[in-house]
Structures are given as C-alpha cells and as structure tokens.
Amino acid sequence: MGASLVGAGMDSATLLESMRAKEALLEGHFELSSGLHSDRYFQCALFLQYPDEAGAAAQSLARAVKGLDIDVVVGPAMGAVTFSYEVGRACGTRALFTERKDGEMVLRRGFSLKQGERVLVVEDVLTTGGSAREVIQVLESLGAKVVAAGCLVNRSGGNPFADLNIPLVALSDVEARTWAPADCPLCASGTQAVKPGSRPGA
C-alpha cells in the first residue's frame, strides 16, 4: 500500500501544459521558501483559480480513489483548501481543512470526524510531504483512518508516506531539482535566483 497510484482523466502532460499556460509552473532559476534554489517553481493557486481546470483535475483524483470508499477529504490551509473542496465535490463527500494555530496543525471551525471515518488527505504540491504528514497525525489522533494521500504535483521523488503504508495518488510526478545556494549550478552560470512569491500581488 506504500506504492504510488496512477490517476485517470486529466493526464500529467495535460495538467502540466495547463499549469504552464497559467504561469502556475515556472521554469528558470528560483529561490524557494526553504532557501534552496530550484529550476522549477509551482504556484498552484494560479491554476486552481480556474474552476473548470480545478474540477477536471479533481475528477481525475476522484476516479483514482473510487475503490477506497472515501468518507471525507481533508487538506491543509491555505494551499490545498480549494483543491480539497473540488475533490470532495468530485467524490461526493464532505471537504474539510486543517490550519495552523500557534504553529500547530489543528482541525478547527467546528469541523469534526467520526471514529473510523475514511479520509483522503489532499495537497496541491508535495515537496517533502511535511504538512500533509502533520495533517495525517491530526486526523489519526481524532480516530479517523487515512486511506490515501493525493496531490496535483508530486516533486518529492517518491511517496513520502510509504513508511505509514499510505498510498499516494499524484496527478503528475515532476522532477524539480534543488540545491543549496552555495552548490547551485544556476548561480555558478551567472543567473540570479528570483522569488516568485515575493512579486507584487503574489
């Protein structure tokens, strides 16, 4: 159950083409929020602002998890709120989100889970899977059963939840290389790293 599952519907090439067209996928030389440098940058909100595309991607994920009997879809705020809602719609389930309070991931706003409810945890982009892992821990502490994780883009290089025996459904697996600034070959070539998230209006 630790293996990656293959989505259906909107295939990887179509998804990435749409993301490029909407500048949700940039290619060049970027400084990530972690401080690492990368040759690709994802801002999925620019893709998810289009309901038709977001809905098509959600339908793909819903088809891929159809046999898992999902009861609830949960994603971490803020990035996964829109996508988790669309996936919930596609699955015909409730859609909740977790958020941070005092630095800790929690389920708030009157949201609750019943003992044993089967949950799909959804992210927009997976890099290390750290936030999604925190969500999984919160949900399991409340008695829910996380049966799968899903995302638009997986750039982790594998399944970050394999050790938890939780399968990953990625609509696209993308190799996005990262380097410490001192080791960055793009810096060595003389190009300047940019931070897209720091642009006005970003």
Image (cartoon, helix red, strand yellow):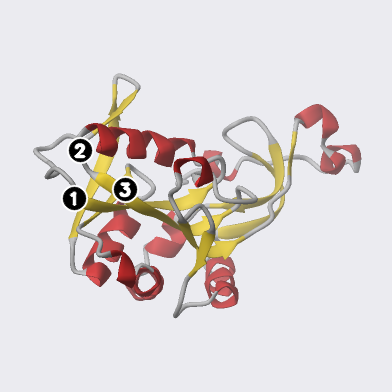
Q: Which residue carries the number 3 mark? A: 146
Quarter-wise, where is residue 106 in the image? top left
Instruction: Indicate the position of residue 8 as horizontal and vertical percent values.
Output: 45, 77
Give the answer, above or below, for where 173 lies relative to 33: below
Quarter-wise, where is residue 180 in the image? top right
Which residue occupies 54% across, 57% down?
3
Q: Amino acid at mark 3?
A: Val
Does residue 129 appear to the left or right of 61 in the view shown?
right
Give the alpha-carbon distance from disc 1 to disc 3, as whole Å: 8 Å
Instruction: Indicate the position of residue 160 as horizontal and vertical percent values.
Output: 54, 44
Which residue occupies 9% across, 38% down?
110
Instruction: Indicate the position of residue 179 as horizontal and vertical percent values.
Output: 76, 37
Q: Residue furthest right?
A: 189
For residue 121, say whether it is visible: no
Give the answer, above or below, for where 23 lies relative to 139: below
Q: Earlier in the sequence, mark 1 or mark 3?
A: 1
Q: Which residue carries the number 1 mark? A: 117
Q: Which mark is residue 143?
A: 2
Element on which disc 3 rests: strand
Which residue occupies 90% across, 38% down?
188
The local crowd at label 3, few if under 14, some if 14 to 19, many if 20 or more residues have their Cα within 10 Å, is many
